[in-house]
Image (cartoon, coloured by chain):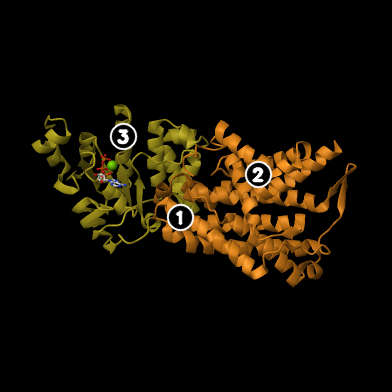
Chain colours: A orange, B yellow
Amino acid sequence: MEEFIQQLTNGLAVGGIYALIALGYTMVYGVLKLINFAHGDLFTYGAYLGLTLLTSLALTDRLGFTLGMVVLVLMVMGLVAVLGAILERAAYRPLRESPRLSAVVSALGASIFLQNALMLIYGARFQVYPDNILPTATLNIFGLYLPLMRVLIVLASVLMMIVLYVFIQKTRIGTAIRAAAIDQGAARLMGIDVNRVILMVFLLGPALGGIAGLMVGLYYGQVNFTMGWVYGMKAFTAAILGGIGNIPGAMVGGLLLGVIEALGAAYLSIAWKDAIAFCVLILILIIRPTGLLGERVADKI
Amino acid sequence: MLLEVKNLHVRYGNVAALHGINLHVRQGEIIAILGANGAGKTTTLHTISGLLRPAQGEICFESQPIHQLPAHRLVKMGIAQAPEGRRIFGTLTVRENLNLGAFTCDDKAQVAKTQRWIYELFPVLAQRHEQLAGTLSGGEQQMLAIGRALMAHPRILLLDEPSLGLAPLLVKAIFQTLWEINTTGVTIVLVEQNARAALKLAHRGYVMEVGRIVLEDRAEALLANPEVCNAYLGGQANRE
Ligand SMILES: Nc1ncnc2c1ncn2[C@@H]1O[C@H](COP(=O)(O)OP(=O)(O)OP(=O)(O)O)[C@@H](O)[C@H]1O
Ligand SMILES: [Mg+2]
């Protein structure tokens, strides 16, 4: 039982990270019907920016752990959001009227560019988050010892999902984003500036993806310039699992995939960890191509 | 002159859809645009609304050229459209759809007033305001599409085949409502296949054929015109 709960909470932490990344894929897909293949790399930038800011600004020393972390999170979100907006301007907007394949090629090109730029700056080796800054404490919850970082990650990712959900459901801009995802032409007839909606989506998605990168750095302590590839694929799987284009779907899909993976690794075989995600993807595409909560997409990718 | 379209040419890629059309709309008028399938009626409305860019020619709203402005600016200026096929946001609620119609309006009190008026015009929308728009019947969806366009508090309302797929009784009710809307000062441009009903409601009409305007007259004159009768009114001249 103890082992099970450890694995379950670990799965929720990783799943929360997948969900935050998956939201970026799903929101961009919702509005542009485009898979942003460079999204995984923006996630990696979040991890590296977090590392650099954490070490160079010594935020946790100066501001204390809690405030330092909050400032760090906000800075990473802001910077990766700006990167997302630049990506949209440079790689996607010029191709808005072109055939979809051009945008896909541009996305792959942007991904390679971002990855290589990171490698040139930081080198190809793993980078390590400073372990003296991070809390190694464990929490005792009803006799169960859970790492503090894990609990914080689960809470933070759930909090961000709730905030995003309320924003999308309740605000004027959120409703405009949903409308543009349903029918861009009709949205424009309502007086919605669709370019601004697209910009908004390329700020929100990367901001959440960047946080996910930071979380991975904090949780595992090390980052690599290619990590966006595996996490991107997993999160993309999570988005498909929930139904791509569907925001609650990405949340549910991410958490579910994280838990399935953690339990599978614990009770089947650790060697199967990555294969499990892709088995889930294949199963979903066969059994329910629309995803758990979504509409038909299989022919749109 | 509220709206003026001058020598408008529109192309889809290499295919020309409009070959230089001219039309004008005065403040307070109801204008009918008739024509067979593919004549270019929807293309005309889309270009006025800024969804399409003219290859040549110009569109003026209150003497200002507007054909280079983005669609969202035109809504704010007072040009609203209930598009062909309704295009309501099916997975949003009726209320959310109406609120989106008022996306460009900052005056909350004005929006609330417009919404009350729309609920008076279409009481069924008030009963269903928390229902998903996609689950409304076709006629209710059409009312929502018109109500949503009115939420923008437009000076001019463009309607693309509002009677499409509706039972005759409902068509009558909707046209009656359009007349009521017009009496509040909203100018209306009405694209219709249902030519007789449209001409009975309208002050003036235009007839389009393959991207050109071939006839332009007062509505009664068009109703009595034998050519129009044969082509669009099912043959029998109407001499009421
Ligand atoms: N997106 C498009 N791409 C290419 N051609 C188009 C497109 N939309 C319309 N056309 C062509 O432009 C011409 C005018 O079309 P339009 O939709 O304006 O006609 P319409 O008068 O509204 O017809 P209907 O009564 O059937 O709605 C048609 O020949 C049509 O095939
Ligand atoms: Mg049409």
- Judge the density around disc 3: few (<14), some (14-19), many (≥20) Cα neighbours within 10 Å: some
Residue drawn at the location 41% of the way across and 44% of the way down: B148
- Work out which residue is located at the far right of the displayed protein and give it: A143
Query: Which one is closest to the eye, mark 1 or mark 2?
Result: 1
**Residue B164 visible within the image:** yes
Q: Secondary structure at mark 1?
A: helix
Q: Quadrant of residue B67?
A: bottom left
The residue at which mark 2 appears reads as A254
Query: Could you say which is closer to the camera, residue A9 or residue A163?
Result: A9
Q: Name the amino acid, label 1.
A: Ala
Asked if labels 1 and 2 share a chain, the reply is: yes
- Work out which residue is located at the far left of the displayed protein and give it: B226
Query: Which one is closest to the eye, mark 2 or mark 3?
Result: 2
Q: Name the amino acid, label 2.
A: Gly
Residue B194, image x, y percentages: 24, 34
- Judge the density around disc 1: few (<14), some (14-19), many (≥20) Cα neighbours within 10 Å: many
Left-right relation of B201 to B79: left
Query: Which one is closest to the eye, mark 1 or mark 3?
Result: 1
Real-space CA distance between mark 1 and mark 2, rounded to the nearest whole angstrom = 26 Å
Real-space CA distance between mark 2 and mark 3, rounded to the nearest whole angstrom = 43 Å
Residue A86, image x, y percentages: 53, 64
Left-right relation of A289 to A273: left
Tally of numbered tags: 3
Chain label for disc 1: A
Q: Secondary structure at mark 3?
A: loop
Q: Name the amino acid, label 3.
A: Leu
The residue at which mark 3 appears reads as B164
- Judge the density around disc 2: few (<14), some (14-19), many (≥20) Cα neighbours within 10 Å: many
Residue drawn at the location 74% of the way across and 59% of the way down: A222
